[in-house]
Image (cartoon, helix red, strand yellow):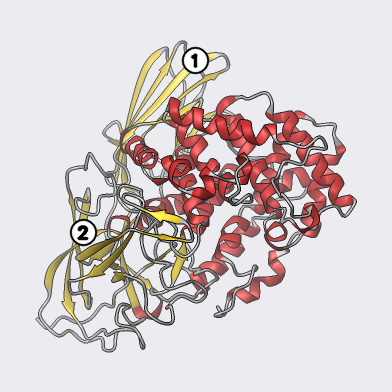
Amino acid sequence: MKASAYRFFTSQEISPRGWLKRQLELEAEGLCGNLDKVWPDVRDSKWIGGDREGWERVPYWLDGFIPLAYLLDNDDMKARAKHYIDRILSSQCEDGWICPNGETPREEYDIWAIHLISKVLVVWHDCTGDQRIPEVLYRMMKNFYELILADGVKIFNWGQYRWFEGFIALNFLKERYPDEAWITELAKLLKKTGTDYGAVLETWKRPLNKWTYYTHVVNLAMMLKSEAVSNALLGEEYTDIAEHFYRTLMEYNGMAAGTFTGDECLAGVSPIQGTELCGVVELMYSFEWLYACTGDAKWAERLERVAFNALPATISDDMWTHQYVQMTNQINCTTIPGKPIFRTNGSDAHVFGLEPNYGCCTANFGQGWPKLALSAFMKADDGLVNAVAIPTEVNTAWNGVPVKVTLDTSYPFRNCFTYKVYAEKKTSMKLRVRVPSFAKNVTVNGKPTAKRAQLVFGGFEAGETVIEISYETAPVLTARPNRLYTVNCGSLLFALPVESECEMREYIKQNVERKFPYCDYEICGISDWNFAFASRDLQVEEREMPSDYPFSSQNPPVVVHAALCHIDWGFEDGYDTVCAKVPNRRKALDAPQKLTLYPYGCAKLRMTEMPLVKSRE
């Protein structure tokens, strides 16, 4: 059995700064921060006594909205979150059942909602310290245990494939009720009746145009943390099976942005297949838990790659609209007439809107940025560790000594970091700083230092200690499947932006209104996209940090200049808005020209994977 290497801070201890705070403000001003005002499935949900969806959408939304409200210390948002929590708690049945299944018999209600709301209540407790929560969760999860034993509920569908999600609450309960044997017994029952993903691994290697639970991208993104959240409670040895699962998924379905395809189910390595936004944020959450459990730097490095590329790429700058799926090579985001390019998604899945294709991502995407903020620093046995170098502040105490640690940085757009440690008294607390594998020429306070996975600082005197860290990164061409290449620099992926025209669509569908700013947008590419790399020579240009949108699609804070030339690429057979999976011919049609690549997360229409061809010069 492996104890967790690190532990999470709560929103009472950590707060955002700099560009991260602005990103969270955009989320609060956008769709996630207003979903309870504009979307019937949250506004009028059965969870609060209404007549709309009473299963996953309100818990999904609260899972991001609650930490967002408390990280920003927004009184209005906190009050609105409390309104939902109060209504949910007040509806708990005498036997402990809490889900609004209505006329649906409990044995026919998918218990995925139990896992999800239990996780949300832990988040609420972390943010507020609400003393009602331990008892509510105790009654709820014990009732769940008793219902399983009495066949009062059934383990099927989503609940069966997401059995490990309930362990967030079970671990919470075990800490507070260590002598309650039923908690461990419930944990064993959930694993026994849940899906063994190792038994279906071979199905990931040959994606099909077939919808299944065991190849569903969100299930798989969640699944990666299953051992990390469950092994201690189950008394099992930690084996790092997530590494085997992740490598298999990436080998057969990997995307350049650090996630794997799934539109909705695994879709191979083609750059014109998509991946679901729910899968992006759930993959981030799995990486956060995996790093906390193991302390292994690979998980934190993978986390920031997904967070800085895949997450912003699929949400509009103002965070009012999002895609259901993003594509690596995406030259149009317009509804596809006829058969979709996606394996099991609809024709509008890549359109930016209120709820393209399906509403789960509308409710769920909000957890991405807040939970990343809460994972920036973690607690170690001997102090603090900076897991992801994003601008944040931690207020805590070490052996009774109040300590504040701040990090100011524009990373990932710049590689300079200023840490300030304020201690009321001299302290033995250590500050550990993770150094990415791609960092070169690391300096501390202006002096070169040996490259290590972690820099460790300690023995802080009373008052303020300033630590300046910097390192260099270099842009490189990285090989991808199908003899294509991408440009990477540090944790950032770069893409050639495609100029576009945008058409706003306001309408009503199934009694749900799309109205500015929560309407849909058809984005049509109007510039050339049929390019290839003509050289490995790449130059980075740092630009002014935008004050409005950190991942601005108009004014990106860093770009890469590259030599590209036109080639005969062509459209995928049967489509005129989707580029072919691979070009028709890999031969330069003209002399190279210098073009500017944007960070992948800034380029909503883009060509990311392109061939390298011999120049005509």
SS at mark 1? strand
- As drawn, is 583 to the left or to the right of 482? left
Quarter of the N terminus within the rendering = top right
Q: How many marks?
A: 2
Q: Is residue 15 above or below residue 582?
A: above
Q: Position of residue 487 (x, y in %)?
A: 29, 64
Q: Which residue is mark 1?
A: 402
Quarter of the C terminus within the rendering = bottom left
User: Is residue 9 visible in this depiction of the protein?
Assistant: no
Q: Nearer the viewer, residue 111 or 222?
A: 111
SS at mark 2? strand
Q: Position of residue 105 (x, y in %)?
A: 78, 54
Q: Is residue 82 above or below residue 56?
A: above
Amino acid on which disc 2 is placed: Val
Q: Which residue is mark 2?
A: 560
- As drawn, is 127 to the left or to the right of 530? right
Picture quadrant of residue 104: bottom right
Q: Earlier in the sequence, mark 2 or mark 1?
A: 1
Q: Position of residue 458 (x, y in %)?
A: 46, 25
Q: What crowding class fits label 2: few (fewer than 14 Cα within 10 Å), some (14-19), or many (20 or more)?
A: many
Q: Which mark is residue 160?
A: none
Picture quadrant of residue 131: top right
Residue at left 64%, top 55%? 240
User: Is residue 99 visible in this depiction of the protein?
Assistant: yes
Q: For the residues marked 2 and 1, what is the alpha-carbon distance in whole angstroms? A: 43 Å
Residue at left 33%, top 82%? 580
Q: Position of residue 440 (x, y in %)?
A: 32, 49
